[in-house]
Image (cartoon, rainbow, N blue to C red):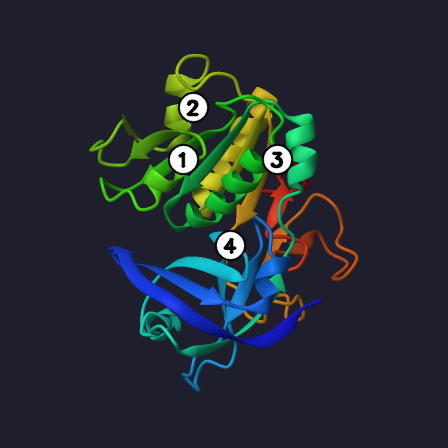
Amino acid sequence: MKKKVQAKVILQRKISDNIYDLRISTELAREAHAGQFIGVYTNDRSKLLPRPISICEVDGDRLRLVYRVTGSNTGTEVLSQLTPGDSVPIIGILGNGYDVDDLVTNYRHPVLMGGGIGIPPMLQLAKELEERSPYPEPYLNTILGYRNSDLFLAEEFKDLSVVHIATEDGSVETKGNVLDVMDAKIGTGLGECDLILACGPMPMLRAIAKYSREKGIKAYVSLEERMACGVGACLGCVVKTRETDPHSHVNNARICTEGPVFDVDALDI
């Protein structure tokens, strides 16, 4: 059940250019799972709606949120000014995440893909998959896509999976994007793949959807779209689907409620 509560800031630090790591304490943390998100309110009275932020990591009664400051008009700049001890109103837990038990039961060779600010939510997914996996190590392969050598969070994934890096400028490992790594390493250093789990910008997810259909690989994507209410009332964050949505009676789904995690076969992207 969604609740609006007051959370306490435990830690806030800048970990990359315009990327911040926020740790908060809240009773809602124990309900959170990989792929879900919360809405964070600011003290800016011109911003009545919460800012949706994906959950990067869950640790007991604490949530870790890694987010990008996108400008003074988005509310994220105000969030970056929070300091330990501050109280911040949040609403959660929101969205449908990954069915991790189903994934570890039915797929032996998953590959996680994260691009840009779509990288943080993949960390909790890697953590849950590794914790519940009945398979011997190494079980997970993770492909992370960056613009350059500023590899935020990459080291933390190495504790949970075999990590492969793609950089747009070629400064680290493979030059290009996450699918360039797949083409270069599948069957070699990366091994097999029977499942793709991805989060990142829409062009990346469209390419992954096309790739998975062509290769016959099951894929689930977590959509990072702008949201308004975050609870499904406004229809401001819809994605085209192949079937008719019972709520709106058109071919779409609300990312904030039916998603943000979707089977790519259900989407028209």
- Secondary structure of residue under mark 2: helix
Residue drawn 63% across the image and 26% down it: 134
* In this rendering, the label closer to the viewer, 2 or 4: 4
Residue highlighted by disc 4: 59
The amino acid type found where label 3 is placed reads Arg
As drawn, the label of residue 132 is 3
- In the picture, the quarter occupied by the N terminus is bottom right
As drawn, the label of residue 104 is none
The image shows residue 213, relative to residue 53, as above or below, that is above
Residue furthest toward the bottom? Answer: 45
From mark 1 to mark 3, how far is it between C-alphas? Answer: 15 Å
Q: Is residue 52 left or right of residue 217?
A: left
As drawn, the label of residue 159 is 1
Q: Say whether marks 1 and 2 touch (CB < 8 Å).
A: no
Q: Inspect this view and state whether residue 256 appears.
A: no
Residue furthest toward the right? Answer: 246
The amino acid type found where label 2 is placed reads Met
Q: Is residue 155 left or right of residue 229?
A: left
Residue 156, given in percent of the width and then of the height, sits at: 37, 41
